[in-house]
Image (cartoon, rainbow, N blue to C red):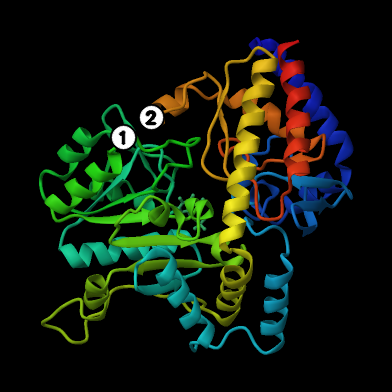
Amino acid sequence: MNDSHVAALADRENQRFAETHPASAALRARARASMPHGYPMSWFHGLNAQGAPFAVSGAGPHFTDADGLRYLDFNLADMSLFCGFAPPAVAAAVAERTARGWQFLLPTEDAIWVAEELGRRYGRPRWQFTLAATTANVEAMRLARVATGRPIVVMFDGRYHGHADEMLFAPGSGGLVAEYLGVDPGAAHRVRIVPFNDPEALQAALAAGDVACVVTEPAMTNAGVIQPAPGFHDALRRLTRDTGTLLVIDETHTQVCGPGGLTREWGLEPDLVTLGESAAGGLPFGAYGMTAALAAVFERPDPDDPHAEIAAGGTLFANALSMAAARAALGTVLNDDAYARTAVLGARLADGIESAAADAGLPWRAHRLFPRSGYAHDGNLPANAEEARCGFRRDVADLQRVYFANRGVWEAIYSAGPCVGVAHADADVDEYLNVLSKFVHELTA
Ligand SMILES: Cc1ncc(COP(=O)(O)O)c(C=O)c1O
């Protein structure tokens, strides 16, 4: 597998994609007049040099694009569609809710049901709602700052917790560097980034006693998959407790691992849990759960000022439609059986990836995180983001995405790796693996 062979295959596949997607190309050309990069979510262009299909409809694990082509989806809108496209129970609840009004700026009973259900699942009794996981994390951090009276947030290298300024820094040679233009460099003073799985670095970052909270995914999912080393979560909880630092576990992606995400699966004890996306079947939804002690701070952030309030909320937060969708998704689709079944399918996928790669003489390893898999091209499952970056070939992943798209299998995000959802069956995993088998043999030919 040499670089020029990868580049030649990419040229061939990009060309084929362009030839078979004239309707999507025409829509993109039209969109360029009204949207930067020709996408309503501009960041998408960096993932789709060859152009992305414009979507028309979806059902189960499939969607259809503007050219009438059908795809078996293994990215599931970055796992936000873990319930599948248009799951009937969520579609019915949404239709029923829209017929009766979807926004009141008043609470609906569904919100109580959802908060109670999330409390039961995640073991954190009090909840607030947003429209996205980003904002759930922003508000969780604010609450942590108020509760501790400290300014700093610690996160792990390789993290993605959303698009707020303080979440968009990475370690550089002379300190933290903003990953994008437009991010306020001043926000770096409120952030520390340390390697995952490194209790000593974490201890050093917390030592000054100025950290409000550590925010982390239980297993990192945005730089491939980085599993916690044995004992890391114990060390994380001990060090945060010892230094009076709060622990925020972001379950936005990992909620697909079990009814209470990895928090419940692994018996973690966060002060705050944040999530979003798939808990409402992919409708706009974010939530954060807190302990009773933190809820008391939330309600009375300043004991001397009965009118003081934490900055939280938005006009559409906890709207009736999001709440109805979350109730239907959690109450009907996301049951114990769904998590058990998708974990088995995820293992079938990971096994299949490793055996297809081995058949072609490639050393690749597959990530294994319940329904989610992914690729470690150098054959080493990473312990931190640096290892993940070194072991992953972006050019191969980009080629694989367009190769798969040309054969009816969709993976939207190069760094994500495939994930099965509730609507997938054994035959869908086998279809993915058949395409993979052809791919790796062409790659090594
Ligand atoms: C772990 C994690 N947290 C938060 C977010 C932000 O979610 P959203 O884009 O819904 O705000 C993401 C998005 O992928 C994520 O992966």
For label 1, count other residues whose C-alpha is less than 10 Å away and answer few (under 14), some (14-19) or many (20+): many
Residue 327 vs 48, above or below: the answer is below
The residue sitting at 65% across, 28% down in the picture is 353
The residue sitting at 63% across, 70% down in the picture is 332
Residue 384 vs 51, above or below: the answer is above
Instruction: Tell me the amino acid under the disc marked 1.
Output: Asn
Q: To which residue does mark 2 refer?
A: 383
If you read the primary sequence from the N terminus, does the residue marked by circle 1 or circle 2 appear first?
1
Query: In the image, 238: left or right of 327?
Result: left
User: Could you say which is closer to the camera, residue 58 or residue 264?
Assistant: 264
User: Mark 2: which secondary structure?
Assistant: loop
The residue sitting at 57% across, 16% down in the picture is 363
Residue 197 got which mark? 1
Q: Position of residue 110 (x, y in %)?
A: 53, 82
The answer to whether marks 1 and 2 mark residues whose Cβ atoms lie closer than 8 Å is yes
User: Could you say which is closer to the camera, residue 188 or residue 229?
Assistant: 229
